Amino acid sequence: MSNLLIDDELITSHGALSIYHAAIDELSRRYGGSDEEFHLQLDELLPPRGLFLLARTDGHPVGGVGLRPIGDEALLLGEVKRLWVRPDQRRLGVAAKLMSTLEVRARESGFAQLYLETGYAQPEALALYQSTGWKPVDHFPAGAFSYPTAYRFTKVL
């Protein structure tokens, strides 16, 4: 992780979009397709309520993660979306650093509790969430989409 920097970046930037689309590509390969456009709009990851963090090593994008508001706005709930790290940068702590930074930024942005989901074809994500204090939950908040077969987690900030 030489020179790893993590910072807010607009999802509409080339670097952020490259990471986002790489994440969608990998999900499509692992699950045999993607219906992303039906369940996430990129503008949900834009400030003032959403955000996207981009990890760069020596100036090059190596990973990212997004956050969008979900459910009843008064409850201050957020959903973590599209955590992804470039394959040659995996197992170096980049994902854990992205997630810990996201939790700090979410708290600073006024979120009270976060949710996320992952699937059977992402065992490394499942292991990360289980090892970093995320608690399993059966359901997402009312009004928030979740895949029926997903593993769902939450964390109070």
Image (cartoon, rainbow, N blue to C red):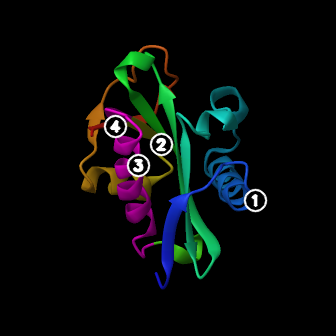
Of 122 and 108, the residue lying toward us: 108
How far, Cα to Cα, is label 1 from label 3?
22 Å
C-alpha gap between disc 2 and disc 4: 11 Å
Q: Residue 14's mark?
A: 1
**Mark 3 — residue?**
105
Q: Which residues are magenta?
A: 91-114
Badge number at residue 153: 4
Q: Residues within 10 Å of mark 4 (few under 14, many from 20)?
A: many
Mark closer to the observer (3, 4): 3
**Residue 86 in sight in this render:** yes
Question: If the image is split into quadrants, where does the C terminus sit?
Answer: top left
Residue kind at label 1, given as amino acid type: His
Does residue 85 appear anywhere in the picture? no
Amino acid type at mark 3? Arg
Nearer the observer, disc 2 or disc 3? Answer: 3
Say what secondary structure mark 2 lies in.
loop
Point out the tag, 2 or 1, that comes first from the N-terminus: 1
Residue type highlighted by circle 2: Gly
The residue closer to the viewer here, 154 or 148, is 154
Residue receiving disc 2: 119
Q: Are circles 1 and 3 on residues that touch, CB within 8 Å?
A: no
Asked which secondary structure carries label 1, the reply is helix
From the image, state whether disc 2 or disc 1 is nearer to you.
Answer: 1
